[in-house]
Image (spheres, rainbow, N blue to C red):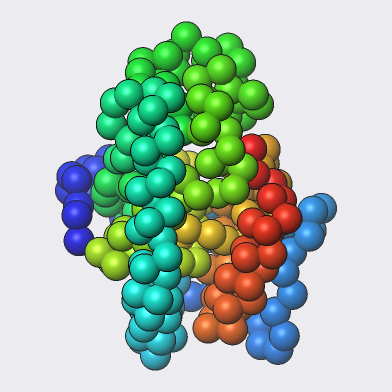
């Protein structure tokens, strides 16, 4: 596992006061995916909760991750190579973008993506901060001027996410789970820590709904809903829904 730094001390102190050893009640029966306007309520900051271990589920989830990624590799590698060449031709520089992201338990790791922006995009982030459509430190701009022409096509088809199959094989990520944030756990509110209790994923509930501009708080509510209801068949449903969402270019920007 390619861990960047140890768990932030501030996060550890907050987590110690937020997580307890009692678990939330998870209702049985069929699991319905949430729809806009029916997002899980924000947890009570003072409430005591913990995410129960599910070793059998985690074993099969990991087995599914590895199996699907190994099947996907012979197709993914040539596509990544072709996209990388096109990106480099338009904007010379490193084509594989490795960004520090926050994973399980608040640990930082390097997430792989194809570069879709100009080479100095991170330096320009502060310049365009006034155009940010989400709550800082979340950052999103419609028609971002830093995105290249090839980058827009790669993003629209979600091909920029393909290199993350290597993150899954390394164990830093799963195919399904909360999307890892670029900002550290130190910026989280106590009620948001629950999303860090599981391995982050390439796709999740809010991605399949095509809600690209959803704010971080609402994404966390969806992540918590997934975590409290997670199971093998829910993961399979999300994976199938992701395939259809990509084919329909739903929510891609």
Front one among 10 and 146: 146
**In the foreground, 137 or 9:** 137
Look at the image and tell me whether residue 225 can be seen. Answer: no
Q: Residue at 57% across / 61% down in the picture?
A: 204
> How far across and how far down the image is residue 141, in percent?
61, 25
The residue most toward the right is 37
Please tell me which residue is depicted at 26% across the width and 49% down the height of the picture. 109
Residue 68 vertical position relative to residue 248 in the rendered view, above or below = below
Quadrant of the image for the C terminus? top right
Which of the image's four quarters has the N terminus? bottom left
User: To which quarter of the image does residue 134 belong?
Assistant: top right
212 in relation to 221, above or below: above
Q: Is residue 14 left or right of residue 207?
A: left
Which image quarter: residue 9? top left
Q: Nearer the viewer, residue 74 or 199?
A: 74
Q: Quadrant of residue 39?
A: bottom right
Q: Residue furthest top?
A: 127
Tell how many labels: 0
User: Does residue 98 sit above or below 206 in this rendering?
Assistant: above
x and y percent of residue 66 in the render? 34, 76
- Residue at the image point whose x is 33% and y is 35% from the top: 95
Report x, y in % for residue 126.
44, 13
Left or right, residue 194 beside residue 62:
right
Q: Nearer the viewer, residue 61 or 112?
A: 112
Measured from the top left, where is residue 131 in percent x and y? 61, 16
61, above or below 4, in the image: below
């Amino acid at each position: 596992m390619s861990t960047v730094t140890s768990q932030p001390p501030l996060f550890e102190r907050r987590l110690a006061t937020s997580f307890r050893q009692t678990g939330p009640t998870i209702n049985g029966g069929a699991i319905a995916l949430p729809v806009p306007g029916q997002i899980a309520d924000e947890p009570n900051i003072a409430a005591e909760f913990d995410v129960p271990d599910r070793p059998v589920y985690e074993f099969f989830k990991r087995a599914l991750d590895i199996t699907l990624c190994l099947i996907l590799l012979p197709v993914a590698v040539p596509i990544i190579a072709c996209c990388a060449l096109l990106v480099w031709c338009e904007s010379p520089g490193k084509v594989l973008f490795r960004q520090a992201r926050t994973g399980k338990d608040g640990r930082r790791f390097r997430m792989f993506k194809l570069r879709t922006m100009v080479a100095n995009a991170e330096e320009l982030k502060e310049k365009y901060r006034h155009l940010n459509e989400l709550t800082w430190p979340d950052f999103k701009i419609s028609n971002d001027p830093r995105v290249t022409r090839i980058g827009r096509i790669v993003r629209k088809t979600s091909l920029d996410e393909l290199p993350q199959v290597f993150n899954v094989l390394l164990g830093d990520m799963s195919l399904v789970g909360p999307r890892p944030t670029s900002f550290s756990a130190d910026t989280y509110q106590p009620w948001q820590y629950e999303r860090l209790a599981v391995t982050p994923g390439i796709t999740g509930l809010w991605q399949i709904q095509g809600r690209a501009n959803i704010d971080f708080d609402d994404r966390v509510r969806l992540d918590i809903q997934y975590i409290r209801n997670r199971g093998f068949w829910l993961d399979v449903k999300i994976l199938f829904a992701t395939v259809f969402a990509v084919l329909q270019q739903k929510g891609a920007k």
